[in-house]
Amino acid sequence: MSLGSVKASYIPDSPDILVSGREITVSFSDRNEKRTTVLDGLDFDIYRGEILGLAGESGSGKSTLAKTILGMVKYDSGRLYVGADKPQMIFQDPYSSLNPAKKISWIMQEPLRLGTNLDKNTRKQKVSEMLSSVGLSDEIGDHKPNELSGGQRQRVCIGTALMRNPELLIADEPVSALDVTVQAQVLELMKSLHKKHGFTMLFISHDLRTMYNFCDRIMILQKGKIVESGKPDEMYRNPKAEYTKLLLESAGISSGAV
Amino acid sequence: MNNYYFKKILSLLATLLVISFLVFSAFEIIPGDPALSRLGTNATPERIAALRAEMGLDKPFLFRYFLWVVECVKGNFGTSYSYNVPVMSMIGEKLPITITLTLLSMSMTMIISVPLGIALAKYAHRTFDKVGFIANQTIMSVPAFFLGILFTYIFGLVLHWFKPGGYISYKQSIPGFIGFLIVPAIAIAIPKCAMSIKLLRAAVLQEADKDYVRTAYSRGNSTMQVMYRHVLKNALIPLVTFWGMAVADVIAGSIVIEQVFNIPGLGRVLLTSISNRDYPVVEAVILLIAVVVVLMDLVTDILYRRIDPRVRRNEKG
Amino acid sequence: MLQSIRKTLKKYNNFFFNVGMIITLVFFVLAVVGCFYTPYNTTEMNVALKNSSPALAHIFGCDNYGRDIFSRVMEGIRNTFFISFFTVMIGSLAGIVIGAISGYYGGKLDEILMRINDVMFAFPSVLLALVIISLFGSGTMVVTLALGIAFIPSFARIVRSEYKKQAALDYVQSAKLMGAKDIRVIFVHILPNILPVLVSSVMIGFNNAVLAEAGLSYLGIGVQPPEASLGRMLSEAQSYLFSAPWYALFPGLAIVFMVLGFSMLAEGISAAKSR
Amino acid sequence: MKKVRIFLTGLLMTMAVALGGCTGDKTAETPVSSAENADGSGYSATGQITIGIAQDLDDGLDPHKVDAAGTREILFNVYEGLVKYDVNGNLVPAVASDYAISTDGLTYTFTLREGVLFHDGNAVTPDDVIYSLSRCADTSNGEALKPALTNISFLQANDEGKVVIKLNEPDPDFLSYMTTAIIPAWNTDPETNVVGTGPYKFVSHTPQESVVLEAFDEYWGEKAHIKNVTLKVIANPDSIVMEMMGGSVDMFCRVTDEQAKELATGDFNIETGTMNLVQALYLNNSYEPFQDERVRQAICYAIDPDEVMAYVSGGEGTEIATAVFPAFGRYYDASLNDNYNKDVEKAKELLKEAGYENSLEFSITVPSNYQPHVATAEVLVEQLKAAGINASIELVDWDTWLSGTYSERNYQATVIGVDANPLTARALLERYRSDAGNNFMNYNNPDFDAKLDAAFATYDDEEQTKLFKECLSILSETAASAYIQDLPCFVAVRKNVAGYKFYPLYAQDFASLYFTDAQ
Amino acid sequence: MLLEVKDLTIEFHDHDRPETVVENVSFSLDKGEILGLVGESGSGKSMTAMAIAGLLPRKKMKKSGEIIFEEKNLLTLPRNDLRGLQGDEIAVIFQEPMTALNPTMRIGRQVEEALLLHRNMTAQDRKNRAIKYLKAVELDDAERIYESYPHELSGGQRQRVMIAAAMINRPKILIADEPTTALDVTVQAQIIDLLQRTNKKLGVAILFISHDLSLISRITHNVIVMQNGHIVEQGNTDEIFANPQNDYTKKLIAAIPKVELN
C-alpha cells in the first residue's frame, strides 16, 4: 500500500495547500462484477495547518476519501497530490484500533522502531513524554489495551499517531463511540495538541454540532459528491445546499436553537 | 449467481486434473511394475516387455497421461490390469458399499449430535456439562479401528449381535447388507458425533450471546423455543463446514474400518490396487474420492447459502 | 517477570487445563524416558514368556514373541509422541506460512493457494506415504514427513480464516501506516493475536496425528518392525483377542489417554484465553 | 512295445512313490459316502461351505498364464491336464485314461478317457488337447507360455483317436508338463469363460470379494460332496480368527500357529501339514560381504532354525539345510542339518577371519503381506545380534519386493519361501545355476554348475539322484543361503467338515471335503 | 399509575466479589407518558430497563425491591406468567438494528412472532396484521420487505421493522434502549418522529433510554438522570434542562456542544 500510487501527480498552484485532489473517482466491484462508484469526480484542497471537517452520513464516502489520501485505496481516475510524509490516522472503534496482544508502551514505540534508530531507553523516554502530553499517567504503558477505558484508548491512539509528529493527521469519527463527557475531553485534547504542534487535521464526523466549535472549515459530502463547503458559522446560518439544511434541521440546529 | 457457481465448478475441475496428474506421476516414482505384478515370479524380460506393450506402458509418460485424460473425458476409465474387468464396473460394484457406509455414519452423527449438542449448551457450566464434556473428549480420542476391534469382540463374538466378517453383498439381500453395515457405521460415527457435539455446543453458546436472542426472549419465547427456532439455524453454520470435511474424512477413514470389518468397499479396492500397481483402478478410485471431497465442498457451500442468506450476495467468508 | 508468570498461571488454572497437563506430562515423561531406558529390552524375545498374562515382573504381560509389552508400549508412546509432535510442527509451520499469506493478501494468490490446498486435502495420505517411502525408504522419518504434509491443508485453512478476520481490523491498518512492512505486520503484529486459536488447533492436530499414525502403522506403513508402534501392536493383537486380550488393551488405552490428554489441554487453553 | 510301456509306467510310479511321505501326519480318512447316493438317480452334491483365502485371484483366470500360488491352488479344482498329481505327488492319468512312452523317450501316446466332459457338457476331443498344448507351445508372439513345451516337434491325433506327441530330445520331466490344463478348442478367451474338466465348475468372481465354485455333477472321477464352495477374500490376516469364530468362515488354509491355537479352542479342527517350500535367509551373493563364503557360513552358524521354528511355527516346522524340502523324499537328507548347528563363537571366528568382526551390517527386505516371513526376520535379527551382526528389517509391499528384490536383485538379504513349480528337482536346483534367469541370489559356483549339467545330461535315474544330492550338499557347504525350515501348514476346518487332503504342491482339493453331520 | 418501581436493587455475583449495579431506584411510569432514562455507560440505565422487561439473566444475579405492573411484582413473577407479558403487554426495541434481528429468518416471521406466541390466529391473519403494521411504520412496499431478510434492509428500515414487531400486540409499555444511537442523523430524526406519533396514536408509554441529552430534551415528558446505579435527579424535562439542580446533571448538559448563531 505504498504512497506512490499517484495516478497523475500534479503540483497544486499555491504552496500552502498540503493535500489536493481533482476529479478523484473511486469505485468498488463486488462479487458479481457490479461496480458501485463511491467517490464521483471529487475536487478538494486541504490547507497547511487547518482543521478541515468532512461531514456526511454512512455511505457518503468519507472514509474512502481518507483511505484514498493515505494510499490505502487506489483511485480510478483524477489527480491527487499529498504533500505530507507518512500521514497518520485515528480510527473510530477504540477496541480494534490497538493491537490487543501488545502492551501500550510497545505499541507507542513502534513508530520510533520503524522510522528512527533511537535506542530502547530514548524510545521509552519519548513514550512517557507523549503519554503525559495526552493526559495519561506513565504506568499506563505496562497495561494491555483491553485494560483501558474507551477514552484512554483513544488518547493512546492520538499519542501513537503523533509520535513522529506527522504533517497530516486524519481522524475518522474519533469520538463518536465515546460517552458525552469523555468526548468533550478528547476533543479538547486534540484541539490543544493541534495548537501546540501545528499539524494539519482532516476531522471526519457525522455530528455537525461537535464540528461547529472544532473545525476551521467544513465540507458536506453526499453520495460521493461535495455539495457544499465553507466556514461553519456562515454555512450553518444560511446553508445553500438542500442536504445541508436537512442535516442541520435533523441535528436540531436552526438559527438560535441550542 | 450462476457465474459464481460456474467459477466454482471450473476450479473444482482444475483441482481434479491436478490430482489425477499427481497420482499418475506418483506411480512413476513408486517402484513395482504392473506387468511384473501380473506375471509373478516366472516373469521373463521378453514376457514383461510384451505385457507392458499390451498395457500401453511402453509409451512415454506424458503421452500416456494425455491419452488417459482423453479416455476419461469420454467416460472410459480403462480396464483393470489385475482383473481385466472394466474399471467402472468394478468400482460401480463397490461404490454402493462405501456410500451406504458413509451415509449411515453421517446420518447417525447428525441425528445424535444435534439434540445432544443443544442439551449440553443449555445446561452449560453445570456438572452435567462437565461430565458430558469429559465423556465427549474421551470418545473423540478413540481411534476408529480400536473401536472397531472392540465392537467386533463385544457385539460380534460375545453378544453375537452380528457375525464378524459376515459381510452380505447388497446383491444377495439388502436388509442383510445394511444390517451388517450398522456396527461399522457406529464405529465411524461415534468419534465424529463427539466432535459435532463439541462444535455445536460451542456454536450455540456463541450465538446465545447475540442480540437477536435477547430480542427473541423479549417477545416471550421460552428457552427451548429460542434454541430450536432461532439459535439452531445460526449455530449449524460452523457445523456444516465440519460435516463437509467429515464426509471426506470418513471416506479416507473407511480404508481402516473396511480392514477391521472385512468390507470390500472402495477403501479395500484402493489399497489392493495400489499394492498390485493396478494404475487404472487406483486413478479411478482416487479421482472418485477427490470428486466426493470436492463435491462436499460444493454441497457445504450450497448449504451455507440455504442457511445463511447473507452469504448469498457477497463472497463466502 | 515472575509476577507475570504467576498471573498467566492463575488465569490458566481451570479444570481441563490441569487434568490435560497432568496426562500430557505423564506421556511426555514416558516418551523421553523411553528414549534411554525401558524396563526390558524392547526386542529381547523369550519363548517361555510367550503370551504370558500381566504379572508383577511384566505388568502389561508379554506378546507372542515373549517381549515385555510395557516396554514396547513405552517405545510405542515414544515413537507415536515424537512422530505426532514433528507432524504437527511441519503441518502448523507450513500451514501458518500458507494460511497467513493467502489470508493477508487475498485475491489471486489466495485463490491459487486455496486450490493447492484443496488438492492436498483430497489426495489420500496413504498414497502420499507410499510415494515418500519409495523416495526415502520406510521408517519413522518418512511417516512424519507424509503425515506432516497431509496436515498442512487443515492448518492452512484455519490460519487463513483467522488472518482474513484480523487483516480487516484497524490496528493492522495503523501498523501499515506507521511504515511496517508486510512481513512484520504478518508475524509481529497479527500472529500473536491468532495464537489462542492456533494453540488449540495444534493440540487437536496432535490428536489427529496420533490417530493417523496409528492408522497408517495399522496398515503396515511407517515404523518398521522390530521397533514398536502402538498402531501395529493393536493390529497384531487382533489375532490374540481370546488368549491374550491385554495385548490389544494396553496399546489402545495408551493411544486413547495420550489423545485425551492433549484435547483436555487444548480445551483448557482455549477456555483460559476466552475468559 | 507294450511291455516297455508297462515297465516305464511302473518305473515312473515308483519314482513318484519315492517322492511320497510328504502328506500330513494325519492322512484324511476315506470319505464315508460312496459317489452315488442311495437311489442311484445320478449324483448331486449338497450343502455350502465358505473358505477364506488371503489373496484374491488377481492375476487372471487363464490356467496357462496364471503364476500366483493362490490362484493355481484353486484352479486345481476347475482344470485338469492329461495327467494330474495325486496326494503323494505321483502323476496319475486324468483326462487321458492311459499313456505310453517310447523306449527312446521321444514319443508319448495318450489315450483319451471315455466320458470326460467339459463343464459346458461337451465331451473332450483330441482337438481340444491339441489346441490346449499348442496354445502353450506357440512362440509366434514372443516367448511360449510354457517354454518346456517348445521341445514338441509333432502333435497330432492318430487314427484310433489317441494323441501322439514327439519330442526333439528326451526330457525325463516332460510328463510333469502334461498337467497343463485342457481347455475346449472353441475357447479363445479363457480369461473370461472359465471352462475346464475338474470336479468343480466356475460360477462367479467378484473382485476382492469372493469366488464361487459349484460341484460339477457329471465329473468323470470321484465326485465332489459339497455343492457350493464360496472362496471369501480376507484381506486382513489379523482378523481371520475373529471371522472364523464369528461363524462367517468355515475353513482357512495357512493360519499362523497362534491363530491355530486360538481356533482349536473354538469349533475347529487343525490339520497340520507342510507348506512344501524352502524358507531361508536368502543372501544376495553379489553384495560385497556375502561374496566371501566364510561370512555366509558365519551367518548359518549364528542363526538357530529350531528357535525360529519355536516362535514362528509353534515348533511344527521341519528344519532344512539346503534347497530341498521333505516332500522330495529321495533327495532330502536330514543329516545335512548338522552342518551348521548354532555356534556363536565359530561364527565370530569366521567373521574375524573374513575381516568383519562386529562390523557386518545388512538389511533384510521382507514382503509385508507374509506374516511368517516377517516373524522369522524379527527372530533372526535377534539371533544375529549375539554374533555381533547388525541386521535391520525393511518391510516392503509385495510388488516392490517382486520388482526391487526378485527381478532387479537390489537387496542385501531377504526372507522368502521358494516352492517347486512344477514339482521336479530340476525346478528347485536350476535356480542356482550362475546364469539362470531366476537366480535372484546371484549364486555363482562353477563346480556346482558342472555337476548340475552332468545331472541333467544323464538319463540313468540312480546316477541323476546321486548327482542331484551332491549338488544339494555343495549348496549347504558353500552356504549359498542360510536355510531355515519348510514352514508348517496349519489348516483350520470347522468340526463338521472332514476329508481335507494335503498335496506336496500348491493345490487345495475341495472335492475331497464332505460334511460329517450332513450325510 | 401504569408502572411503579420501588427501591429496585440489582447485584451481580459472577465475579469473585458481588458488584451492585443498581441501588434503590424508584420511579413511576404513567399511561401514554414518554419517560427519559439518561446516564453514561455503566450508570445502570440499561440494567433497570432490562429488569422491567424481565430480560435479566436468571442465575448469578440478586434482585430486590418491587416492579409493580397491573398489581403484579415483575421481579417475583413465575417465569410462565412473565413470558405471558413479554411481547404482549411489555415490548422492547434495541440499539443495534444490524444485530437485533435474526439474520437467517425472514422479516415477516420475526414481526409476527409475538402474535404466534400470544394470540391464536390463522397464518393468513398473522401475515395481514404484520403487513398492516409494516405499513404503519411507513415502510413502503411492505409485501417485499415481509419476504426479505434483515441484511437486505438499511439501518433505518430495520429499526422500523423492530418497532412494528414490538407494537404488533399493542403493548402498554414500550422500552426503547438507545434506539437511534447507531443511526445516521437524518434517519434518527425520522425514527424519533415515528415513536412520538406511535405514542400519541396508540397511547403506549415509552421508557426512552439514551446517553444523548439533546435528543432526550426534545422528545421526553419527564426524565431521570442516573449515575453509578443511583438516580441523581428526576422530574419534568423542560424544568430540569432549564435549571438543573444536581452538579452531575449540570455537567452533562454543559457537555452538549452549543451552537450559538448570533
Image (cartoon, grey):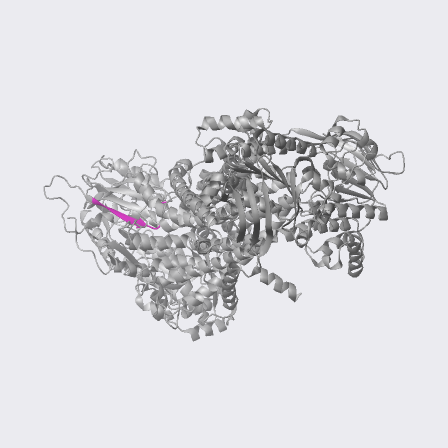
Q: Residue furthest top?
A: E141
Q: Is residue E3 above or below residue E127?
A: below
Along the viewing direction, whichever of C79 and B57 lies nearer the viewer: C79
Along the viewing direction, whichever of B175 and D415 lies nearer the viewer: B175
Q: Main secondary structure of the magenta part?
A: strand
Along the viewing direction, whichever of A180 and D69 lies nearer the viewer: A180
Task: Locate residue D127: give its quadrant.
Answer: top left
> Residue C224: horizontal and vertical position, in percent?
47, 59
Residue plotted at (18% across, 43% down)? D45
Residue A181: tell me if it is visible.
yes
> Residue E181: horizontal and vertical position, in percent?
66, 39
Residue A91 in the magenta stretch? The answer is no
Task: Locate residue A54: give its quadrant.
Answer: top right
Q: Residue furthest front?
A: E1
Along the viewing direction, whichever of E31 and D321 lies nearer the viewer: E31
In the displayed structure image, the side of residue D98 where residue B185 appears, left or right: right
Residue D49 in the magenta stretch? The answer is yes
Residue A231: tell me if it is visible.
no
> Residue D222: horizontal and vertical position, in percent?
18, 46
In the displayed structure image, the side of residue A150 where residue A168 appears, left or right: right
Magenta stretch, residue numbers: D47-57
Q: In this figure, what is the number of numbered marks?
A: 0
> Residue C52: horizontal and vertical position, in percent?
34, 68
Q: Is residue D66 above or below residue B74?
A: below
Q: Is residue A249 above or below residue D24?
A: above
Q: Residue furthest right?
A: A14
